[in-house]
Image: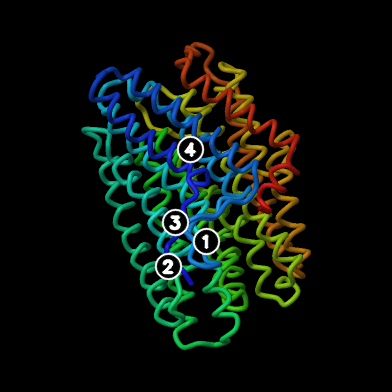
Amino acid sequence: MSLVQSVDNVALLPAYLAAGTAVLVLLADLLLARAGATVAVAAAGAIATMAGAAAVGAVGTRRTFCVGADCSWVFDARAALVAAVFGLLTLGVLGLSGPLLGAGPTPVGEYCFLLACSMTGGVVLGAAGDLITLIVALETLTLPLYVLVGLRRGSLASAEAAVTFFVVSVVATTLTLLGAALLYAVTGALHLDRLGALLGAAGDLPLTTAAVALVVAGLGFKVAAVPFHAWAPATYDGAPLPVAAYLSTASKLGGVVALLAVVQRALPADVTGPVLAGLAVLTMTVGNLVALRQRRTVRLLAWSSVAQAGYILAPLGALALATGRTADARATAYAAVVAYAVFFVALELVAFAALVALRPVGTDGGTLDDLRGAARRQPWIGAAFALALTGLAGLPPGLAGLFAKVTVVRSVLDGGAGWLALVVAVNAVVGLAYYLRLTAVLYADADAAVPAGRPPWPVSAALAVATAVTVVLGFAPQLVLALAAG
């Protein structure tokens, strides 16, 4: 067997475009020294990355860096979907960041460079075929976020949030690396498909359970699953609003993609299934119950995203049962996880974009009372916010969220885990309380003397695009599900 790895540059095109964006942003900041030009280069790079991912994904699965049948890079329809979503998130956050960057305290070049680097990690993560590529890509996605959270000069809240995020993420990465090292010690393999074949054929190998537990726990931190969630509310609330939007979407999507990759292709389902079922129940229940008590808007959205992580993990919990480990049930569960994550990311981005549009430039998310009557003063922004909230609750007219909830429940039922579907349904009802409460606050009577104000055009454009994408997803959910199936 040849040890020379083949290289398919077409398969690597989306990664080239994302990484090239980061380099071009640095050059634009150095040579042009104009904030608008730097942001424009970053936005153009995000659009090019989306286009490249769509073009490569349309021609079928492409593999590269292969040794025999084992490949470190597998770019299929799912990888194209993930890369396009990361490009869209980067583009949206750049739009939301316009007022923040124009205010002065945040350096534009460094900000756009870090966003582009994080986008590169997300693009690579979707196509990772071995543990090393997966972990490096996940850290490339996450490391820039430590700096972005604390990049706002003179803000103690941002500095505290950055330190909290950094410390917790270091622990999570350590656990994941230790688990990966144990898997390599047991099997001598790093490619995900080879790991899955060896672990499935050999049965109960020494240290396998410990290795699986460490990997799942480490990735559980990235997803903000209970009990690995404590960093999320404090970090989201302390970060600048556009960065909080990126954290709650891109970071969670990255964790979900990484966790799904190892569960689907490498780790034994009979071991991971019970663990993930327990994590799903804990995460959705704790997230919803604590969200009921929140009065700060960003903390409410943060705890909401914790609960949403539980819904995302629920289909994988069906792997605990033999019925859920059949080929058809597993394929349905894996597609449901990716599809729900995409729908959640779109709705969450709309919610944060509306919040940025409603709040004064440079301020935090404020309290629920600060948003009282906001939809009456800004009808279109309020309508977009309400659409996102009803979608996250799983109600019409948020069709994307409604389809996502139905997809999760259907996949869990197909896996024979009726009890888990019941837990999902009960938690969805609990979640209605705080989503509808926030919606009611938006449309409540308020002091008419409060000026409405007009959000800057980059924020309005980002909100309009994110809302349009969400509406389109709501009317074309089967397309997302087909791409999620790979």
Count of numbered circles on the image: 4
Q: Are marks 3 and 4 in contact (CB under 8 Å)?
A: no
Under circle 3, the secondary element is: helix
Q: Give the class, few, some or many, for how many residues have Cα within 10 Å of label 2's Cα (few <14, many ≥20).
A: few
Left/right placement of residue 6 relative to residue 363 reads: right
The residues bearing labels 3 and 4 have C-alpha atoms spaced at a distance of 22 Å
Nearest to viewer (mark 3 / mark 4)? 3
Tell me what residue is drawn at x 71 percent, y 48 percent.
Answer: 481
| Coordinates of residue 280 in the picture (x, y in percent) | 59, 63
Task: Tell me the residue that label 3 is attached to.
Answer: 222
**Residue 475: mark in rendering:** none
The residues bearing labels 3 and 2 have C-alpha atoms spaced at a distance of 34 Å
| Coordinates of residue 70 in the picture (x, y in percent) | 52, 66
Tell me if I can see residue 132 in this picture: yes
Q: Is residue 87 above or below residue 176?
A: above
| Coordinates of residue 341 in the picture (x, y in percent) | 60, 49
Nearest to viewer (mark 3 / mark 1)? 1
Nearest to viewer (mark 3 / mark 2)? 2
Q: Earlier in the sequence, mark 2 or mark 4?
A: 2
Under circle 2, the secondary element is: loop
Tell me what residue is drawn at x 35 percent, y 41 percent.
Answer: 238
Q: Give the class, few, some or many, for how many residues have Cα within 10 Å of label 3's Cα (few <14, many ≥20).
A: many
**Residue 3: mark in rendering:** 2
The residues bearing labels 2 and 4 have C-alpha atoms spaced at a distance of 54 Å
Which residue lies most toward the front here? 2
Task: Tell me the residue that label 1 is attached to.
Answer: 259
Q: Earlier in the sequence, mark 3 or mark 4?
A: 3
Q: Give the class, few, some or many, for how many residues have Cα within 10 Å of label 4's Cα (few <14, many ≥20).
A: many
Under circle 1, the secondary element is: helix
